[in-house]
Image (cartoon, coloured by chain):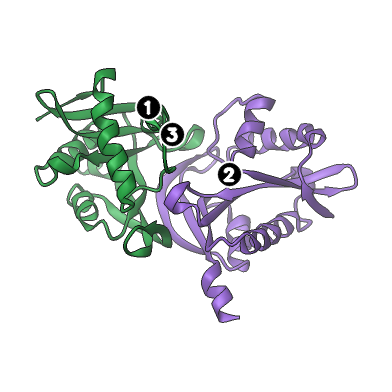
Chain colours: A green, B purple
Amino acid sequence: MEIREMRPADWPQVFSFFSAIVDEGRTYAYPEGLDAEGARRLWESPGRVVVAVDGDVVLGSAGMGPNRPGRGAHVATASFMVAPAARGRGVGRALGKHVVAWARSAGYRGIQFNAVVETNTAAVRLWQALGFHVVGTVPGAFRHAEDGYVGLHVMYLDLVDVSDGV
Amino acid sequence: MEIREMRPADWPQVFSFFSAIVDEGRTYAYPEGLDAEGARRLWESPGRVVVAVDGDVVLGSAGMGPNRPGRGAHVATASFMVAPAARGRGVGRALGKHVVAWARSAGYRGIQFNAVVETNTAAVRLWQALGFHVVGTVPGAFRHAEDGYVGLHVMYLDLVDVSDGV
């Protein structure tokens, strides 16, 4: 598995699992029915997008950038998707570690995830394993396709304290 | 004081205090140096904007709409600005009560504020007085002009439980 910048030729594969994941309705509060161009604009909106690939097969993707402009631009954010066919192979973990390393090297003071669905326990546990903690949970903020209204975690990793401690 | 939908003729006054407040660097992580058109697009982006007026004088403004698209669109969000010259007259409270009533009547299940600067104690107390609570605080997420890195509160008002209890 290699992680590299997304290229235009990757997008059809990314859009395929992007659509499948949004349609599942378990993890992302994104607009419904986005076409390939609209989805690409949304996915690229944080600023930088990478893909995890195995040869020509795109296994997953992550978008990353500042969480806010101006006086909030020292905190990064990121979003992750792993192709359903590639689950359980450590793709999410590899992308997460990549994002943490990127944010640290780019000088961000922390990484904030704004909306982690609380029932997505695989993701919550993975981010916790990478050092993130749950700052708080907005109750019922996500309308889950099977579970109804569930909470959205705000999660945060402090990169300053980590660096200071080393 | 009257609260009504913003009209094009109101914008120069709103932009004047919008710019002053963003330049103060105490409350909003917005892009710096926005021109009138860029600021208007940002301020109108939640969907609906009202102004608090006293005759021809605009005292404050609030923007409101869904906090997220798709499976998050049942939670509202809002932003508020009060003209520095009109502070201490209850304009923020009147706008806040207007937004809560609007969200309830529009069928939202709650209202989320994503980024309330923790040192903006007047705002934090006001929202608490209106029933909001602090869900969590992202440490150091706001670079305050005088105080340095301070936290951003996520605040939430549950409209479903309130309605159920009545």
Q: Secondary structure at mark 1?
A: loop
Are the two marked residues, 1 and 3, in contact with CB atoms closer than 8 angstroms? no
Q: Quadrant of residue A92?
A: top left
Are the two marked residues, 1 and 2, in contact with CB atoms closer than 8 angstroms? no
Q: Are marks 1 and 2 on the same chain?
A: no
Give the amino acid at mark 2. Thr
* Residue A88 horizontal/vertical position (percent): 10, 47
Q: Are marks 3 and 2 on the same chain?
A: no
Kindly identify which residue carries mark 2.
Answer: B27
* Residue A79 horizontal/vertical position (percent): 31, 40
Give the amino acid at mark 1. Gly
Kindly identify which residue carries mark 3.
Answer: A73
How many other residues sit within 10 Å of disc 2, few (<14), some (14-19) or many (≥20)?
many
Give the total number of marks visible in the rendering: 3
Q: Secondary structure at mark 3?
A: loop
Give the amino acid at mark 3. Ala
Kindly identify which residue carries mark 1.
Answer: A47
* Residue B91 horizontal/vertical position (percent): 75, 54
Does residue B101 appear to the left or right of A47 in the view shown?
Answer: right
Labels 1 and 3: the sequence-earlier one = 1
